[in-house]
Amino acid sequence: MLLQMVSLGQAVVVRCRVSAKELSSQGIEYLQLVHPGPVHLLPGDPMAALDVRFLDRFFDLHVMSPVQHAVSGALTGDPVRRQEGLALAEQKLELAYAWLEGQLTGRIWAAGADFTLADCAAAPALFYADWTHRISEAFPVLRAYRARLLGRPSFARAVEKARPFRPLTAAIKIHCNCASFASTASSKMM
């Protein structure tokens, strides 16, 4: 198996003897089929797997994309574009938060009782979304879900190992209602 960058320079590829798969949702599915391990991030039931795939895409398209829009606006250095990007992100994230509040009610993880591919997408998306547009107390189910994601050992390790690099994000300064990303650099696990 060989890891290489895609020609666009945005994704890593797993290249096996026969084919290449991007290391994203498709790559995780591929690895589960070809090299199954003890953890199954996609349920065996095809209908349940559809729900997981839908939620994976939801977190990517409706949570992470607005965050990226805000970041892109901030990186231009233009205050107007920064504000426009943040305003659009806040509007879209508020809609996503409201939908997720209902969707996650009664569930431990995004798609039910088991940690799945959907939760892999949700963890970084909600981590940064909360920095961009704070998840308010109006969404207690979503806030509790984000806390469970942050408490998951593998994600907690990733957050902790990245902590020294948080000051590098201070230039973006799109943090909601208060300080910048830099101020969160010293907070435990925001």
Image (cartoon, rainbow, N blue to C red):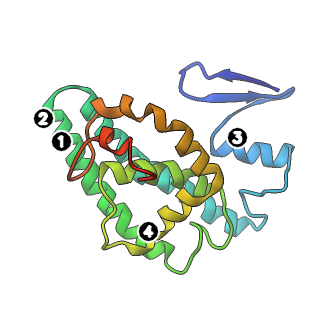
Local crowd at mark 1 within 10 Å, few (<14), some, or many (≥20)? some
Secondary structure beneath dot 3 equals helix
CB within 8 Å, label 3 to label 1: no
Mark sitting on residue 84: 1
Find disc 2 in the rendering and name its residue: 80
Local crowd at mark 4 within 10 Å, few (<14), some, or many (≥20)? many
In the rendered image of this protein, does residue 130 appear above or below residue 50? above
CB within 8 Å, label 1 to label 2: yes
Tell me the CA gap for discs 1 and 2. Answer: 6 Å
Q: Between disc 3 and disc 1, whose residue precedes? A: 3
Identify residue type, mark 4. Leu
Q: Position of residue 31 (x, y in %)?
A: 78, 43
Secondary structure beneath dot 1 equals helix
Local crowd at mark 3 within 10 Å, few (<14), some, or many (≥20)? some
Q: Between disc 2 and disc 3, whose residue precedes? A: 3
**Nearer to the camera, 70 or 161:** 161
Secondary structure beneath dot 2 equals helix
Local crowd at mark 2 within 10 Å, few (<14), some, or many (≥20)? few
Mark sitting on residue 62: none
Residue at (28, 49) in percent of width and height: 89
Residue at (13, 32) in percent of width and height: 79
Tell me the CA gap for discs 1 and 4. Answer: 26 Å
Quadrant of the rendered structure where residue 77 is? top left
Q: Which is more foreground, mark 2 or mark 3?
A: 2
Find disc 4 in the rendering and name its residue: 142
